Image (spheres, helix red, strand yellow):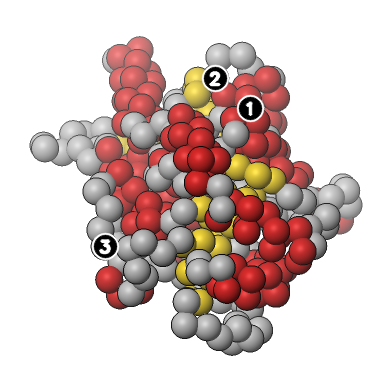
Amino acid sequence: MALSSTRLLVAASGTGGHLFPAIATAEQLSDYQIEWLGVPDRLETQLVPQKYLLHTIRVGGFQGRLGLGSVRLMTQLMRAVFQVRQILQQGKFQGVFTTGGYISAPAIIAARSLGLPTILHESNALPGKVTRWLSPWCTTVALGFDTASSLLPRTDSICVGTPVRSQFLQAASDLQELAIPQEAPLVVVMGGSQGAVAVNQLVRQAAPAWLDAGAWLVHLTGDNDPEVDQLSHPHYIHRPFYDNMAALLQRADFAISRAGAGTLTELAVTRTPAILIPYPFAAEDHQTYNAAVFAAAGAALVSRQSDLTVTDLRDRVLTLLNDRERLAQMAQAAGDLAITDSAERLAKLVREVVQIHSTKSN
C-alpha cells in the first residue's frame, strides 16, 4: 500500500489496556505516517519504537482531593500541553488519536488549541476522568462498551468495541510446549502484574482440589509474586506471563481473571467463560463496571475480592468443571459480546474524521 501524506499522532501510554488497542488500530492505518506520544519508562518504550517514532513527555494523573500535589500536576500538565503543541506543529500532524488515560489530556488540549481533529477511544464501561472531562473537546468519541455512553456529557459517541492484538483473530496455534493433554480440562488464571498477588494466593490454596479432580492449571502469576514457588504439581504450570495468549484462551475451558477492558475483549473474542475478580484498587472501581456487563450477558461469574474466600473459589471452579452445558452457554454469551472487527471500525472512523477536517481546511 502506498504511503499517504496523512500524518497522525497516536497518544497511548501506560498499560496494555491502552496500548494494545492503539497498536491494533494503527496497524489498520498502515498507509498513514504515524508517530507516537507516550511517557518515559512505561510499557510503550518497549513496544512502540520497533514500529513508530516515539515522543515522550512527563505527565501524571489526578487522584484524590485537590491540594499541593494537584498544583504540581497542573503545572506539569501545562508544560506537557506546550510540548505536545510543539510536536504537533513541527510534525505538521493532521489529527490525534488517543485511547484515554493521563497522556490523552495534554494531547486533547493541544490538538483543540490548534484546531486539529481528535478521536478518543474509551475501552471501559465506566469512562475515565479524562474521558468524562475532555470528551466534549474531541471531534469523536468511540466506546468499547455501549453502556458507557450514558455516563458521558455528549450524546454522539459510537460503540465500536475494543481492538485486540492480531493474534486473537487468527486460527489457534498449538500449545505443544505446555504438553497439556487434548482431553484434559484446562483452567487459565490471569491475575496480571497489577494486583495479582491476592488472586494468586487464593488460587494456590484452592487449586489442589481442582488438580485432584483431573484439571490442568496454567497460572500466569505476573512478575511481582514472592510466593510463586509455593505450589508444585505435574498438572500445575506457572509462568510470569505467556506470549501466545490467544491460543491459550482458545484452548481453555474457562479463565479466572481480573476485569480490565482489554482482557475482557480477549475473553469475548476467544469465547472463553470466566470467573472475574475485579481489581479493587482500579481507578473509580471501573473493573467492577466492566465485569457487570459480562455477568449480565451470562458470560461470566463475578466475585468481589473482599468477599471471596478460598472455599468459595474452590467450589465455583469445581461446579463449572462438572457443568459442560453451562460452560457452553457462557462461551456462547462471551462470543455474542465480541466485536471482532473493532480495529477496522475504529480505523475507518479515524479516516473519516481526518478526511472531513482536511476537506474543510482546504
Residue 255 vertical position relative to residue 285 in the rendered view, above or below:
below
Which residue appears at 51% of the width and 36% of the height? 329
Query: If you read the primary sequence from the N terminus, does the residue marked by circle 1 or circle 3 appear first?
Result: 1
**Residue type, numbered disc 3:** Asp
Q: Determine the residue positioned at 34% across, 48% down.
A: 168
Taking the image as drawn, is residue 1 in sight? yes
For the residues labelled 1 and 2, say whether their Cβ atoms are less than 8 Å apart.
yes
* C-alpha gap between disc 1 and disc 2: 9 Å
Marks 2, 3: nearer the viewer: 3
Residue found at the very far left of the displayed protein:
2
Residue picked out by circle 3? 174
Q: Residue at x 36, y 34 (%)?
A: 340
Measured from the top left, where is residue 213 in percent x and y? Answer: 56, 68
Q: Quadrant of the N terminus?
A: top left
Can you identify the residue that label 1 sits on?
148
Which residue lies at the image location 34% right of the left edge and 32% below the top edge? Answer: 341
Residue 157's tag is: 2
Q: Position of residue 87 (x, y in %)?
A: 43, 46
Q: Secondary structure at mark 1?
A: helix
Of 79 and 304, nearer the camera is 304
Report if residue 87 is visible in the image.
no
